[in-house]
Image (spheres, grey):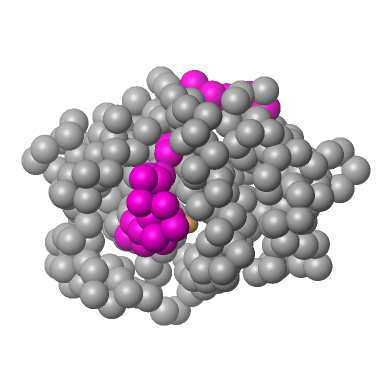
């Protein structure tokens, strides 16, 4: 059983194994396929096709499946690797160990945002940003420059307390747990972290920054925490709704997985 750990508790060897597996997926081309997939599922509320990955109830099951696939890819390199999560309510500054040169590397420099330390710095020669939305091929960050500090534990708890998963109009205007966790309303959780990191994290090609996986792993954990806190609440909508993925409808691009299939993670992995 895979156990996903808090990144703050990883040993030096665990950090090294995670980084090396990520670098190997980059080298063999599999990593960039994940970036391409993610970018294809960034949509607005007014897109006329069905919203799947974001701004919709399936935000959580879509990313749970996406993370599972990435974790399996890492394990094809090194069977001992699991996704770590970043609890940004605790490790909330640019000086936190997650940004160390032995792990994800540090902030971008002020002139152009380029990350210059750690394994993903352009200067290390192993992390060319190929799937990109502009001409810049180097990883960029501007930690904390987005203005708002990272969310607090009290803000997280206020969202975990919401008993209803989602509600009409099932998009970024909705009330309920999913949209507050995704961050389009209220205290703004998930979206705020993308803005706080800056650089590619604020775009559809956000998985170019490996911190994407650690951020979304914590979002996935918060969904699991919410499920435990509200055992009688479940994914909504339960039945057919135009342009919205309901409980038993398959999700693109896999077409073999429904939100119902993603509700119980415990047969695949647990959180330490
Ligand atoms: Cu996403
Ligand atoms: Cu995200």
Q: Is residue 176 left or right of residue 81?
A: left
Q: Is residue 195 left or right of residue 54?
A: right
**Image height of 21 relative to 129, above or below:** above
State which quarter of the image contains the C terminus.
Answer: top left
When asked about the image quadrant of residue 16, the answer is: top right
Report the front residue among 56 and 69. Answer: 69
Report the front residue among 115 and 3. Answer: 3
Residue 146 in sight in this render: no
Report the front residue among 128 and 181. Answer: 128
At 23% from the left and 61% from the top, the residue drawn is: 259
Instruction: Report the magenta residues as a range.
Output: 65-94
At 16% from the left and 49% from the top, the residue drawn is: 267
**Image height of 45 relative to 61, above or below:** below
**Image height of 101 relative to 64, above or below:** above
Q: Does the magenta portion include 174?
A: no
State which quarter of the image contains the N terminus.
Answer: top left
Q: Is residue 168 left or right of residue 11?
A: left
Q: Position of residue 156 (x, y in %)?
A: 39, 28
Q: Position of residue 217 (x, y in %)?
A: 40, 43
At 84% from the left and 39% from the top, the residue drawn is: 109
**Image height of 243 relative to 174, above or below:** below
Q: Position of residue 99 (x, y in %)?
A: 64, 32
């Amino acid at each position: 059983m895979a156990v996903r750990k808090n990144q703050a508790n990883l040993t030096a060897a665990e950090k090294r194994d995670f980084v090396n597996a990520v670098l190997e997926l980059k080298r063999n081309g599999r990593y960039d396929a994940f970036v391409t997939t993610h970018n294809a599922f960034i949509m607005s509320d007014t897109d006329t096709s069905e919203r799947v990955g974001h701004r919709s109830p399936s935000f959580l099951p879509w990313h749970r499946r996406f993370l599972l696939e990435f974790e399996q890819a890492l394990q094809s390199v090194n069977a001992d690797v699991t996704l770590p999560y970043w609890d940004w309510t605790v490790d909330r500054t640019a000086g936190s160990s997650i940004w160390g040169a032995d792990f994800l590397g540090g902030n971008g420099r002020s002139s152009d945002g380029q990350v210059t330390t750690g394994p993903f710095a352009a200067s290390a020669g192993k992390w060319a940003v190929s799937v990109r939305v502009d001409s810049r091929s180097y990883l960029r960050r501007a930690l904390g420059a987005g203005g708002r500090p990272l969310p607090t534990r009290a803000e997280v708890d206020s969202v975990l307390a919401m008993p209803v998963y989602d509600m009409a109009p099932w998009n970024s205007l909705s009330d309920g747990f999913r949209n507050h966790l995704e961050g389009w309303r209220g205290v703004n959780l998930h979206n705020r972290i993308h803005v706080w990191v800056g650089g590619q994290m604020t775009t559809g090609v956000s998985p170019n920054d490996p911190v994407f996986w650690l951020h979304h792993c914590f979002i996935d954990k918060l969904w699991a925490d919410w499920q435990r806190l509200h055992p009688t609440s479940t994914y909504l909508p339960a039945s057919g709704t135009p342009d919205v993925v309901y409980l038993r409808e398959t999700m693109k691009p896999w077409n073999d997985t429904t939100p119902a299939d993603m509700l119980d993670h415990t047969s695949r992995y647990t959180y330490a």
